[in-house]
Image (spheres, grey):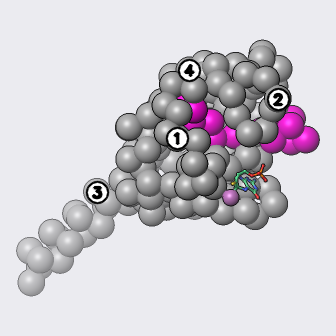
Amino acid sequence: MLKTLAASLLLLFSAAPTLALEPAQGPVLLRVSGAITDTNTTGGVAEFDRTMLLALSQRETLTNTPWYDEASTFSGPLVRALLEAVGAEGSTLRVIALNDYQAEVPVRDFFDYEVILAMSRDGKTLSVREHGPLFIIYPFDEHPALMNENILSRSVWQIKEIVVE
Ligand SMILES: Nc1nc2c(c(=O)[nH]1)N[C@H]1C(S)=C(S)[C@@H](COP(=O)(O)O)O[C@H]1N2
Ligand SMILES: [Mo]
């Protein structure tokens, strides 16, 4: 009985998220919650400011998109670097925008493709008016088959929150 209790307590503690991330210093651009192990708030949430997002492994994607007339260079962290930073354990991301638009994105996408959380376009920070602060950008030109309604619905702009499920 005691042994079972000890074992379940151990399980409880090892499964609980830990404050492994440095706290955000600047304005929080993104909150990540759900099935994650590494957080920086007592509420089990990982908050990211601009500096923290730029410290993750970055990528530049030159591509055409439905949103701009000409090909643009988008840059920002790889989504899989973000997932690694928070110790994501789920299989789906619920990605939530400022206007409360939501999309469910399979985690698999981020290992199959170099998908980024774009923070800038052609070197210019994405303002909220220009789909910022964070915009999921798939490498459409490198994989033309990605240009379909399914992937476009996962291309959430004005992202404020991600729940790992
Ligand atoms: N924040 C936000 N992102 C979004 C959407 C939205 O309504 N809000 N619509 C999605 C859908 S369903 C598609 S097909 C693409 C393209 O949308 P658009 O044709 O309205 O630009 O953006 C996706 N990203
Ligand atoms: Mo859509």
Q: Which residue is mark 4?
A: 59
Of label 1 and label 3, which has the lower sequence position?
3
N-terminal-most mark, 2 or 3: 3
Looking at the image, is mark 3 or mark 4 nearer the viewer?
4
Give the spatial CA distance, label 1 vs label 4.
18 Å
| Numbered disc in front, either 4 or 2 | 2
Is 15 inside the magenta-drawn segment? no
State how far apart marks 1 and 3 are (Cα): 38 Å
Image location (x, y in percent) of residue 126: 81, 31
Q: Quadrant of the N terminus?
A: bottom left
Q: Which residue is tagged 1?
A: 146
Q: Residue furthest top?
A: 123
Disc 1 to disc 2, how far (Cα)?
18 Å
Residue 71 placement: quadrant: top right
Mark 2 neighbour class, 10 Å CA radius: few under 14, some 14 to 19, many 20 or more: few
Residue 159 visible here: yes
Q: Disc 2 residue type? A: Asp
Up-down relation of residue 14 to residue 134 (above or below): below
Q: Which mark is residue 69?
A: 2
Q: Is residue 109 above or below residue 60?
A: below
- Callout 3 crowding tier (Cα within 10 Å): few <14, some 14–19, many ≥20: few
